[in-house]
Amino acid sequence: MAENNNQQPQGLQIELKPEIGVGVYANLALITHSSSDFILDFTCMLPGMQQPQVRSRVVMA
């Protein structure tokens, strides 16, 4: 059986930059939504902190 060298690779090719790959620490996620979007706020809440700080926000359609 002959191989077809013109086939495209299967799957999604995603680039992960090193500064993003390190990630951020979050121990709380707040999720809000509208009729068309979801907003995910990832926060860090530690003992002694007056107010949790949003570390990262993701908006999805």
Image (cartoon, rainbow, N blue to C red):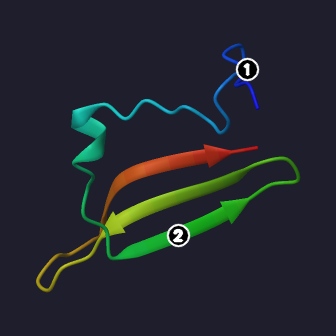
Residue 26, image x, y percentages: 31, 68
To which residue does mark 1 refer?
Answer: 4
Count neighbours of disc 1 (C-alpha within 10 A) and say few if under 14, some if 14 to 19, many if 20 or more. few
Is disc 2 placed on a helix, strand or loop? strand
> Taking 15 as reference, is 47 above or below it?
below
To which residue does mark 2 refer?
Answer: 30
Q: Which callout, 2 or 1, points to the residue nearer the camera?
A: 1
- Sequence-wise, the earlier of marks 2 and 1 is 1
**Which residue in the rendered view is the most extreme toward the front?**
1
Residue 6, image x, y percentages: 71, 13
Which amino acid type is marked by label 1? Asn
| Mark 2 to mark 1 CA distance (whole Å) | 48 Å
> Taking 8 as reference, is 13 above or below it?
below
Looking at the image, residue 58 sits to the left or right of residue 8; the answer is left
Looking at the image, residue 14 sits to the left or right of residue 45; the answer is right
Is disc 1 placed on a helix, strand or loop? loop
Which amino acid type is marked by label 2? Leu
Which of the two residues, 28 or 21, is positioned nearer the viewer here? 21
Residue 19, image x, y percentages: 22, 35
**Which residue in the rendered view is the most extreme toward the top?**
6
